[in-house]
Image (cartoon, rainbow, N blue to C red):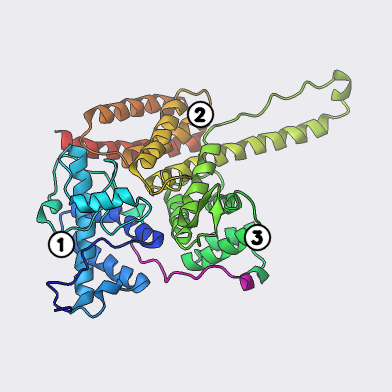
Amino acid sequence: MASDPRVHKPRLPKAYTPQQLTFLKSNLVEFERRSQGSIRGDAKKYALERASDFITQFGLPPEFIGVHEAENKFREQIYNWFKNTVGRNRRKIEGRPRSGTKKVTEKAQENPSDIPWNPVPATIIPYTHAETCSNPANSTRPTVVSPVQYAALHPSTSIPTPLPPVTSPHLKLTISKSTIRDAFLRNTEASSLANMIQTYMMSNPSPTPLTAVVEALFEALSTETKSGHFNDNREALAHLRRYFEASTYFAPSMVHAGVSGPMAGPRAIQMQVRKFSTWVPNATSKQRSPALSSASTSNSMSDEMQRIAGDRQRRKDHIQWANIHAAALELGMLGMGHAGDSDNSGYAYAMGRAFSEMVARDAVWESDEVEWVAGICVLRAVIRTAMRGDRRQRDEYDELLRTYEKRWREIKDEARQSFVTEVLLAAKEDLARLDETLR
């Protein structure tokens, strides 16, 4: 009877490793998007493919060894995990009663640091810890409240085989910030990129070693951006997705700002995004002495040209950081990896979104047009990651878009105005998706 599929124990709570949890959660958005599509069975096909990737990367759990058709049964279990996670979060948003057995809840409360196969989410924010359950009621799909999600937000391909911890032989390699920047430009595989980053962190110990890595990512993104051209956030999404995948390989010994392991990567992004979210104009120029004006005319002109060029570059950089901010929000990185969190709770995710909403609300009222450009980039990401079914929230975003449209008419730089035109139109399309469930 031990191998009888009716009595084996794969559905009992089993502990996830941080890498397994990160892998599964990174594919939830795409599963949700496909479940809302018109192709029947597309979401299930996607979930089963990701389950195969899971097995390839992590192997089957020990309790499945020796079970008849173990791989097929485990793939179905992963599919139920995706389905029930989405269904559960929707029910929480609607205020419907939470399902699940008391035993699982009590176990999670007794040992909150143990992440089970079917943990119970603590909040209504989507894509927190979820459960694996065979109860058909958990797969009910409401039609009123559901998240606006997009295929490009999370990687749909498998993450390569986990890496062993970085060992001392790697320290013989010369890894610098420019080396990591070049690795981003070459689209280096996530596992190799993770090895390089960990080697750099061990060679350059500090409380925040990943700051230089995020700066290298920014430099790579700036290098790909043509002069005078503002990208539409695709490059930022691609680079941050690769960075996020690489961070899933970080060993527990890799620490940034008090956060260790895979969550150290998102933590570093959060700190840099907050640091560069505020525009700081140049200080006023010092008054020159009239006696020196004639002798230093050529030098002053050269200095002024350098100042103008530097100021223009600072404005481009500010918009580039706004693109990174928007991409991080869409990838769910702004609510992850806070020091002291025993899990990646929905509360942290909500706090991350609250910061982005604040930036979008405030930027439109500032005096410099570069802040309006940065603000609309963040606002579009806020709309793209909003929840459907909330009319008050939808009306607030609509009013903000109208205000940004007024600012658009005041923008003097043609390149920035053209860029904002594209972002505004795209944001209005995203907002229209919120309207579909309110009609």
Q: In the drawing, what numbered circle is on residue 41?
A: 1
Quarter residue 350 falls in: top left
347 is higher (above) or lower (below) than 217: above
Marking on residue 431? none
As shown in the figure, which amino acid type bears the numbered disc 2? Answer: Glu
Q: Residue furthest top?
A: 290
Asked if the residue under mark 2 is in contact with the one under mark 3, i.e. CB atoms within 8 Å, the reply is no
In the image, taking residue 270 as reference, residue 154 lies left or right, namely left
Ranked by sequence position, the earlier of labels 1 and 3 is 1
* Of residues 269 and 113, the one drawn nearer to the viewer in this rendering: 113
Report crowding for label 1: few under 14, some 14 to 19, many 20 or more residues within 10 A (C-alpha): few
Task: Identify the residue at image location x=14%, y=33%.
Answer: 439
The residue under label 1 is which amino acid type? Gly
Estimate the spatial distance between the alpha carbons at disc 1 and disc 2, rounded to whole Å: 47 Å
Label 1: element kind? loop
Q: Main secondary structure of the magenta part?
A: loop
Q: Which residue is mark 3?
A: 176
Q: Which residues are magenta?
A: 156-170
Query: Which residue in the structure is indicated by mark 2?
Result: 369
For the residues labelled 1 and 3, the Cα–Cα distance comes to 47 Å
Which residue: 34% across, 54% down? 152
Q: Is residue 332 above or below residue 31?
A: above
Of residues 319 and 5, which is closer to you in this image? 5
